[in-house]
Image (tube, rainbow, N blue to C red):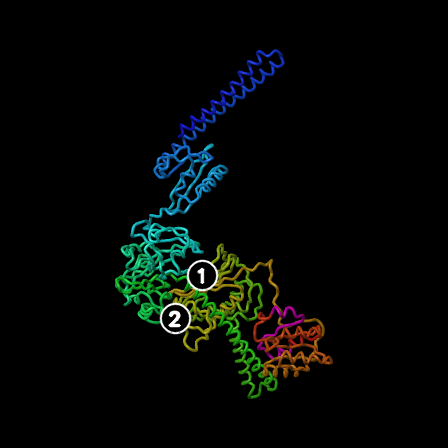
């Protein structure tokens, strides 16, 4: 064909050259016999010009033909050595040459164009070849991967001079991996999320008897779930089969598993060994009859033929035999269950769906397994998060109620102490009541720390200086049998935290380390700068990229078992004997660290010891945080211990104490047990109120809401907010109210009167 086209081109070129040569000769003859000299000169010049053009074009054409001939020869040499079908065509698609593989593959050597040659393979060869030819002509090369009934093929086109070099490559053969036409192949279709069939292997086409485009043409009821038993419309009528689905992003490979009396039954379990879905055949008694390789890999070495299913998995809350019996009797058909495998090396959860089949009239169960370990891990994380949040809310609510009680107890104790001298016999009893009330307040503060609802006073802190100030106290805490070793980074970056609360965290961790070593040992406290170039993910949290100051507290104790390790930060959880601890030390440390923007982790090895690691973000001096809200105001001007106070408090004992305390200091006190009553009191325009003292959280209208309403008619009145909750719970609301301060409960008589006095100008 190459020689024929070359001869044709030479014939065309020869005809053109003869015509032009004849014109040159004719013009030359006319010029020689022309009577006028001027006409003769013109004809001779025209003859010379055309002759020169003919000569140049002849030379260029010969050179182009020589280059094209060389390029085609090189292309034919390349084609001959290529194991794939290759075709050389013109840019219009006319076939110039083919290699032997193409002649054998297509069996159409006489087809004039590439589109005709590809017609038996592709649905729209004209559009495909035109699209690739245009791309190759413009960019030099182009290729496309096309899914066909025989597999996935890649058609590529390369520009070779003025021609196109086509190459057809089979990327994936449908007859591979047991998906061919043999009876041992499993029928498989590739379906999209919209249930459009993208591909059918030979076994599936043989089963259905034709090519189909939609999944509902094979299966009547959709959507379907993996492991579900469905009715498949085959060439010989409907057949009951089990569908096994492999998750593969947008496309879903669906395998149809054979049942008894199917013509695919001869395949047996040998055909399922390479199926990437764990499958187990189970007898009604729970005995494992057979399984494939993925199931053995998932369940472990404990899975053997003849072993009971109950010996390799657990977790239903009832016996495995009852579960199997319910499935056999049709009560739980197709209902998935989550079970835990009895593996000794690691914890694995599986989701199992049972399908009932019949083999020779004997009922048998097919178990389709999915690894659900990651799902159960996420579920455990969510449950733990919900539990910690619920405990935090409970702790915050309990702390609020206790603060109200403690305010009344310590407040009335202060009133009694004012009426007793140190020499009175009741004075020491009152002091004991006051001290124990303060201890109870500290315990409530720990609850608030865990729930991250306490009021922090952050400042720039150098961890090295903080530990240096605590060294003497810490040495006294650890005792004589324990050695405390401190190691610091030479240039430690500052952090932003509440120094008092940070000291409490360190003391709690060191006291716990001491208690873990009753026979003595060494506690190491190490601080250093840490740069995280990538996020650190562990213990269900992610530490972002950045600069941190880390603090490690390591002991040489007995260690903490792995099943208890994630519970150590829960409140009231303790491994100590009754009476030796409240279980709030680590939960307090957890709350303070989290509220300070840090992270805390624990690592432990039985028999070697435990390490607590704290991450605190480094503080940039150029980005100084806003100062915390002041506890008491310090306005300029003279102070006086008189004036009218509107006291709004829904707790009667607290209101009684605060009212008596303020009256003792010379204030006139107007009481209200709700915000609505306070607003009604303010309707009397004759009343001159110097300061509002109000609880924040009350039934009905809360403190900030009624204060904003009152300030519309009485602007400029100072406000003292009191609450058993932390300031953070309503800090944004308070910031919108001018000249307001916060006094946390429980407060003493002196703190109350001093705060009110500082607010009155």
| Residue 301 within the segment the image draws in magenta | no
Element class at badge 2: loop
Please tell me how crowded label 1 is: few (under 14), some (14-19), or many (20+) other residues with Cα within 10 Å.
Answer: few
- Can you tell which quarter of the image residue 41 is in? top right
Instruction: Say which of 726 and 161 sits in front.
Output: 161
Q: Judge left or right: residue 90 versus residue 722.
A: left
Picture disc at residue 519: 2
Residue at the far bottom: name it. Answer: 425
Exactly how many numbered labels are in the figure?
Answer: 2
User: Looking at the picture, how far across and down is residue 643, in whole percent?
Assistant: 70, 79
Element class at badge 1: strand
- Can you tell which quarter of the image residue 626 is in? bottom right
User: Looking at the picture, how far across and down is residue 557, in whole percent?
Assistant: 40, 67
User: Looking at the picture, how far across and down is residue 263, in whole percent?
Assistant: 29, 55
User: Looking at the picture, how far across and down is residue 666, in whole percent?
Assistant: 68, 82
- Residue hosting label 1: 538
Instruction: Say which of 60 and 382 sits in front.
Output: 60
Residue 435 vertical position relative to residue 499 in the rendered view, above or below? below
Please tell me how crowded label 2 is: few (under 14), some (14-19), or many (20+) other residues with Cα within 10 Å.
Answer: few
Q: Is residue 238 visible?
A: yes
Figure quadrant of the C terminus: bottom right
Magenta region: which residues? 731-753
Residue 432 vertical position relative to residue 317 in the rendered view, above or below? below
Nearest to N terminus: mark 2 or mark 1: 2
- The label nearer to you, 2 versus 1, is 1
Q: What residue appears at the point 57 percent right and 58 percent down from the top-left corner? A: 620
Q: CA distance from mark 2 to mark 1?
A: 32 Å
Figure quadrant of the N terminus: top left
Marks 2 and 1: CB-CB under 8 Å?
A: no
């Amino acid at each position: 064909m190459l020689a024929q086209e070359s001869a044709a081109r030479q014939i065309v070129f020869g005809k053109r050259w003869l015509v032009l040569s004849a014109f040159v000769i004719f013009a030359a003859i006319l010029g020689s016999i022309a009577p006028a000299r001027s006409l003769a000169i013109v004809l001779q010049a025209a003859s010379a010009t055309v002759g020169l053009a003919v000569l140049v074009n002849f030379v260029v054409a010969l050179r182009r033909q020589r280059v094209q001939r060389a390029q085609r020869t090189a292309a034919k040499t390349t084609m001959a050595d290529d194991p794939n079908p290759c075709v050389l065509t013109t840019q219009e698609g006319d076939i110039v040459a083919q290699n032997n593989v193409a002649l054998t593959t297509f069996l159409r050597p006489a087809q004039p164009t590439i589109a005709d040659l590809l017609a038996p393979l592709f649905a729209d060869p004209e559009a495909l070849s035109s699209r690739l030819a245009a791309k190759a002509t413009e960019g030099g090369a182009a290729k496309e991967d096309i899914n066909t009934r025989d597999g996935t093929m890649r058609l590529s086109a390369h520009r070779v001079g003025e021609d196109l070099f086509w190459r057809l490559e089979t990327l994936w053969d449908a007859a591979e991996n047991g998906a061919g036409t043999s009876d041992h192949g499993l029928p498989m279709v590739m379906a999209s999320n919209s249930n459009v069939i993208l591909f059918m292997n030979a076994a599936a086409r043989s089963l259905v008897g034709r090519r189909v485009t939609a999944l509902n043409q094979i299966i009547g009821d959709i959507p379907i779930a993996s492991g579900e038993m469905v009715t498949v419309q085959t060439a010989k009528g409907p057949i009951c089969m089990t569908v096994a689905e492999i998750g593969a992003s947008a496309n879903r490979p669906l395998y149809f598993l054979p049942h008894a009396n199917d013509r695919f039954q001869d395949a047996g379990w040998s055909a399922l060994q390479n199926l990437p879905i764990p499958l187990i055949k189970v007898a009604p008694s729970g005995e494992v009859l057979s399984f494939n390789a993925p199931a053995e890999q998932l369940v472990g070495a404990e899975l053997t033929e003849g072993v009971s299913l109950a010996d390799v998995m657990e977790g239903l809350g009832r016996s495995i035999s009852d579960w199997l019996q319910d499935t056999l009797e049709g009560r739980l058909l197709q209902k998935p269950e989550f079970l835990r495998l009895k593996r000794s090396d690691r914890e694995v959860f599986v989701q199992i769906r049972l399908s009932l089949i019949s083999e020779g009239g004997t009922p048998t169960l097919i178990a389709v397994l999915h690894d659900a370990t990651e799902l159960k891990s996420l579920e455990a994380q969510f449950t733990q998060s919900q539990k910690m949040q619920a405990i935090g809310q409970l702790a915050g609510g309990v702390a609020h109620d206790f603060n109200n009680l403690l305010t009344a107890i310590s407040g009335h104790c202060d009133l009694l102490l004012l009426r007793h001298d140190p020499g009175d016999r009741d004075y020491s009893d009152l002091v004991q009541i006051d001290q124990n009330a303060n201890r109870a307040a500290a315990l409530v503060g720990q609850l608030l720390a865990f729930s991250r609802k306490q009021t922090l006073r952050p400042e720039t802190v150098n961890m090295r200086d903080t530990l240096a100030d605590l060294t003497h106290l810490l040495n006294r805490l650890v005792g004589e049998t324990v050695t405390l070793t401190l190691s610091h980074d030479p240039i430690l970056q500052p952090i932003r935290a509440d120094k008092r609360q940070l000291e409490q965290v360190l003391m709690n961790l060191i006291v716990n380390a001491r208690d873990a070593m009753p026979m003595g040992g060494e506690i190491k406290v190490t601080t250093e700068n840490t740069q995280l170039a990538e996020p650190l993910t562990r213990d269900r949290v992610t530490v972002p990229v950045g600069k941190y100051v880390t603090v490690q507290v390591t002991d040489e104790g007995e260690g903490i078992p792995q099943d208890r390790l994630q519970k150590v930060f829960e409140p009231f959880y303790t491994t100590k004997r009754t009476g030796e601890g409240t279980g709030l030390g680590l939960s307090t440390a957890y709350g303070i660290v989290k509220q300070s923007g840090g992270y805390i982790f624990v690592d432990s090895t039985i028999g070697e010891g435990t390490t607590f690691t704290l991450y605190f973000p480094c503080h940039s001096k150029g980005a100084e945080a806003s100062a915390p809200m002041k506890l008491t105001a310090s306005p300029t001007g003279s102070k006086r211990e008189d004036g009218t106070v509107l006291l709004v408090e829904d707790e009667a004992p607290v209101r009684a104490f605060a009212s008596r305390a303020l009256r003792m200091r010379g204030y006139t006190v107007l009481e209200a047990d709700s915000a609505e009553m306070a607003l009604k009191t303010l309707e009397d325009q004759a009343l001159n109120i110097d300061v509002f003292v109000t609880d924040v959280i009350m039934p009905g209208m809360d403190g900030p809401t009624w204060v904003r309403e009152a300030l519309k008619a009485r602007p400029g009145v100072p406000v003292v907010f009191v609450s058993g909750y932390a300031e953070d719970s309503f800090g944004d609301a308070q910031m919108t109210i001018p000249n307001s301060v916060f006094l946390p409960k429980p407060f003493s008589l002196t703190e109350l009167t001093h705060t009110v006095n500082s607010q009155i100008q």
